[in-house]
Image (tube, rainbow, N blue to C red):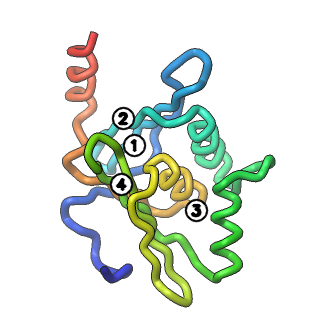
């Protein structure tokens, strides 16, 4: 797979619109990813710690704060090896969300099947495109109807 290939038609570019918590103890995170045409994907079932990282990077557009994190480690490894993260692609794999990370530098690298929440955190940190399969996106009103049916 060529890292510089054109965007596949079944993927849409999204941004992090909202980050919060599902529970009052901030143990489980939730994120709303939104496309330019207003379609959304609500992602949950990731740690509150990851949600805090996403929120702080989205607000401050900065690198991870102390204490050192896995995101800081990835950043250091990339810097030492002259690699740049250029995009993250989120997709379903069975019942879970996974992601591929695309890096370029002396050599193009695609890291496959990583946690989507970590990929979104890194993409937010580097302000790079987050691509998500179109079939995961829905109109906000459709999402509300889906949530109402759960109650």
Q: Please determine whether, in this image, residue 116 is positioned above or below residue 138.
A: below
Q: Choose the circle earlier in sequence order: 3 or 4.
A: 4
Q: CA distance from mark 3 to mark 4?
A: 16 Å
Q: Please determine whether, in this image, residue 91 is positioned above or below residue 81.
A: above
The outermost residue toward the front is: 94
Q: Secondary structure at mark 4?
A: strand
Q: Quadrant location of residue 113?
A: bottom left
Residue 27 location, x and y as percent? Answer: 58, 26
The circle on residue 126 is: 3
Q: Secondary structure at mark 1?
A: strand
Q: Are marks 4 and 1 in contact (CB under 8 Å)?
A: yes
Check disc 4 and report the residue beneath it: 90
Q: Are marks 2 and 1 in contact (CB under 8 Å)?
A: yes
Q: Please determine whether, in this image, residue 9 is positioned above or below residue 83.
A: above
Check disc 1 and report the residue beneath it: 33
Q: CA distance from mark 2 to mark 1?
A: 6 Å
Q: Secondary structure at mark 2?
A: strand
Q: Is residue 7 left or right of residue 53?
A: left
Residue 52 location, x and y as percent? Answer: 63, 37
Q: Choose the circle earlier in sequence order: 1 or 3.
A: 1
Q: CA distance from mark 2 to mark 4?
A: 13 Å
Check disc 2 and report the residue beneath it: 42
Q: Quadrant of the C terminus?
A: top left
């Amino acid at each position: 797979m060529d890292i510089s290939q054109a965007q596949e038609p079944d993927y849409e570019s999204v941004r992090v619109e909202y980050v919060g918590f599902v529970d009052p103890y901030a143990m489980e995170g939730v994120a709303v990813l939104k496309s330019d045409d207003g379609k959304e994907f609500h992602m949950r079932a990731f740690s509150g710690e990851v949600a805090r990282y996403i929120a702080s990077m989205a607000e401050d557009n900065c690198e991870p704060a102390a204490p050192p994190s896995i995101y800081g480690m990835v950043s250091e490894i990339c810097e030492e090896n002259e690699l740049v993260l250029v995009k993250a692609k989120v997709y379903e794999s069975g019942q879970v969300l996974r992601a591929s990370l695309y890096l370029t530098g002396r050599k193009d690298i695609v890291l496959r099947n990583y946690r989507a929440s970590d990929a979104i955190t890194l993409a937010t940190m580097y302000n790079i495109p987050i691509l998500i399969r179109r079939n995961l996106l829905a109109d906000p009103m459709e999402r509300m109807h889906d949530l109402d049916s759960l109650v």
